Image (cartoon, grey):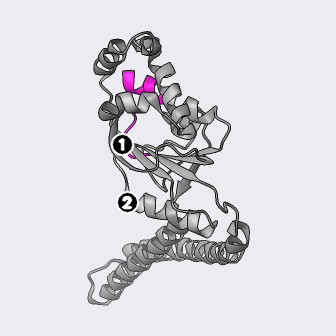
């Protein structure tokens, strides 16, 4: 919402610059540089740009009103909304400091503590290497071996990520899957925030991530997917690479 306001303001500046340029051209007409026909075209362009500029200024005014209203309502809505709630963050790809800061500000506004744990996944995955590790550990883990089991493996990891505790699969496959990890891995959380910082993933990685998101969405606690406003391609807009955005996890775009 706020990004759009600045974008509209910049467009206003562009239109003003165009108008000034046209006026300069009109000013040259006295020296015979511009013909009468050209002057008529220039005046028509000025009228059109003035109209568009007025519309944009109106949009800026309306957006400013919306922002002011939001600023008034936001503290009341957020106050104590997540008091003492334990939140975990899962990155698909490397961590993003600006997104993390935005998340932490939001949690603080809602009176929640800092994230309990933050994990960033390495993508794309090496499915063959995962199978080798799982197969070596016997029957308890061989049920996840094979390309057709990647979704089930991801779902089990998603469930473990929320629940904490022993997290056997994360311990076994952590070196292959985790790029970075901070915080308490054993503590159960009350909600999960998912952030995708890489482009859409095909093949084995897509099947695996589908499972992870399905495992998170199917748990007994809330999960939400976030991304920066204006991200392209988007993971939260209709028709994105995540069918039913984030595979059932409700999406949110943040500035």
| Left or right: 216 as drawn, with respect to 202 | right
Question: Horizontal and vertical percent for residue 196?
Answer: 43, 44
Between residue 123 and residue 189, name the one nearer to us: 189
Q: Quadrant of the N terminus?
A: bottom right
Question: Horizontal and vertical percent for residue 42?
Answer: 42, 75
Is 123 rendered above or below residue 61? Answer: above
Question: Horizontal and vertical percent for residue 143?
Answer: 47, 11
- Say which quarter of the image contains residue 112: bottom right
Q: Residues within 10 Å of mark 1 (few under 14, many from 20)?
A: many
Is 206 rendered above or below residue 132? Answer: below
Residue 207 is inside the magenta segment: yes
Q: Looking at the image, which residue is at 42% across and 79% down?
A: 19
Between residue 251 and residue 194, name the one nearer to us: 194
Q: Looking at the image, which residue is at 66% across and 42% down?
A: 221
Residue 202 visible from this viewpoint: no
Q: Looking at the image, which residue is at 70% across and 75% down?
A: 69
Question: Horizontal and vertical percent for residue 31?
Answer: 26, 89
Q: Which residue is mark 2?
A: 97
The alpha-carbon separation of the residues under discs 2 and 1 comes to: 13 Å
- The region drawn magenta spans 196-210
Q: Which residue is mark 1?
A: 93
Question: In what element is the residue under mark 1?
Answer: loop
Is 2 rendered above or below residue 134? Answer: below
Question: In what element is the residue under mark 2?
Answer: helix
| Left or right: 73 as drawn, with respect to 27 | right
Residue 137 is inside the magenta segment: no
Q: Residues within 10 Å of mark 2 (few under 14, many from 20)?
A: few
| Left or right: 219 as drawn, with respect to 195 | right
- Say which quarter of the image contains residue 177: top left
């Amino acid at each position: 919402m706020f990004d759009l306001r600045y974008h509209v303001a910049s467009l206003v500046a562009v239109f003003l610059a165009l108008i000034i340029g046209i006026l300069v051209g009109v000013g040259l007409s006295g020296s015979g540089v511009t013909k009468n026909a050209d002057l008529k075209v220039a005046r028509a362009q000025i009228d059109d740009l003035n109209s568009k500029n007025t519309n944009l200024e109106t949009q800026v005014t309306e957006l400013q009103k919306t922002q002011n209203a939001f600023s008034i309502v936001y503290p009341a809505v957020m106050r104590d909304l997540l008091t003492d709630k334990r939140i975990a963050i899962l990155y698909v790809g490397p961590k993003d400091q600006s997104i993390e800061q935005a998340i932490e500000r939001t949690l603080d506004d809602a009176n929640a503590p800092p994230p309990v744990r933050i994990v960033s996944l390495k993508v794309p995955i090496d499915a063959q290497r995962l199978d080798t590790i799982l197969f070596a550990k016997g029957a308890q883990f061989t049920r996840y071996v094979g390309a057709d089991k990647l979704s089930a493996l991801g779902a089990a990891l998603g469930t473990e990520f929320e629940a904490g505790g022993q997290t056997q699969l994360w311990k076994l496959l952590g070196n292959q899957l985790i790029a970075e990890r901070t915080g308490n891995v054993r503590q159960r959380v009350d909600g999960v925030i998912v952030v995708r910082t890489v482009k859409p993933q095909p093949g084995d990685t897509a099947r695996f991530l589908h499972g992870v998101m399905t495992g998170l969405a199917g748990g007994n606690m809330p999960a939400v997917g976030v991304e920066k406003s204006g991200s392209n391609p988007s993971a939260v807009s209709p028709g994105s690479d995540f069918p039913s955005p984030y595979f059932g996890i409700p999406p949110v775009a943040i500035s």
